[in-house]
Amino acid sequence: MSPRPRQASDAEILMAAFRAIARIGPARVTLADVARDAGLTAAAVVQRFGSKRALLLAAAADAAAGHTYIFEGVRRAHRSPLAALLGLADCMTILGASADAVTHTLAFFQLDLNDAGFRAHASAGARHFEAGIRALLDDAVQARELRKCDTARLAHALHATLNGSILDWAIRREGPMAARVRRDLQTVLDPYIRRSRRATTASAG
């Protein structure tokens, strides 16, 4: 009797999809690539998701929910809300371990702009991520690390800076991505940082 094929959870298959996308890009990735990465047969992935588009949509939905563990993790790692904001730069390594992997992952997110189904997940993810940034800004103001300001407006600017900094790094590929993103976040935050905190955040960067 042949052994039963290994079962994998949807989460495991989606993680395999992200790895395959980072390795070869969303345009070239196939269900067979994902299956190999997950240690499954291509038929098993087809049975679970049905098509490449359905699998990529599921991956987009999963990515849109990523804000939850990103902000939980950064808050665990930093007692200071301001340090946690700058620590978001380190979390962006989730996009890939190399410049090519980051570029492939960014290409996956570009699918969001051309397809209403993908764009809905991207829009929800952006709103949730921006809300996470605003919550950290509110905490930083409460902790007197930042001066009082319009945290909704600043959160939007920081989110745009974060996204733009990653794209700029993917084009230039100069130095570590986290260092570049941290520097750009620091630049936007600097006018709002209370003077007593500036030396501390500068040395932390």
Image: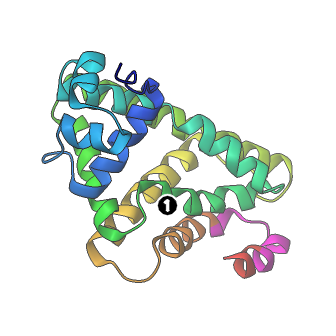
Q: Is residue 149 above or below residue 51?
A: below
Q: Amino acid at mark 1?
A: Thr
Give the position of the C terminus as an image quadrant. Answer: bottom right
Measured as percent of width and height from the top left, residue 99 is found at: 33, 70
Q: Is residue 173 magenta?
A: no
| Residue shown at the point (17%, 39%) measured from the top left | 30
Write the start and end of the magenta stretch as one range.
Answer: 190-200
Question: Can you identify the residue that label 1 sits on?
Answer: 93
Left or right of 135 on screen, residue 99: left
Give the position of the N terminus as an image quadrant. Answer: top left
**Number of other residues with Cα within 10 Å of mark 1, as a class: few under 14, some 14 to 19, many 20 or more:** some
Residue 5: quadrant of the picture: top left
Q: Is residue 2 above or below residue 16?
A: above
Check the image and name the residue furthest to the front.
1
Q: Nearer the viewer, residue 70 or 55?
A: 55
Left or right of 74 on screen, residue 182: left
| Residue shown at the point (33%, 45%) measured from the top left | 37
Q: Secondary structure at mark 1?
A: helix
Measured as percent of width and height from the top left, residue 129 is found at: 53, 39
Residue 112: quadrant of the picture: top left
Measured as percent of width and height from the top left, residue 88 is found at: 59, 56
Measured as percent of width and height from the top left, residue 67 is found at: 55, 38
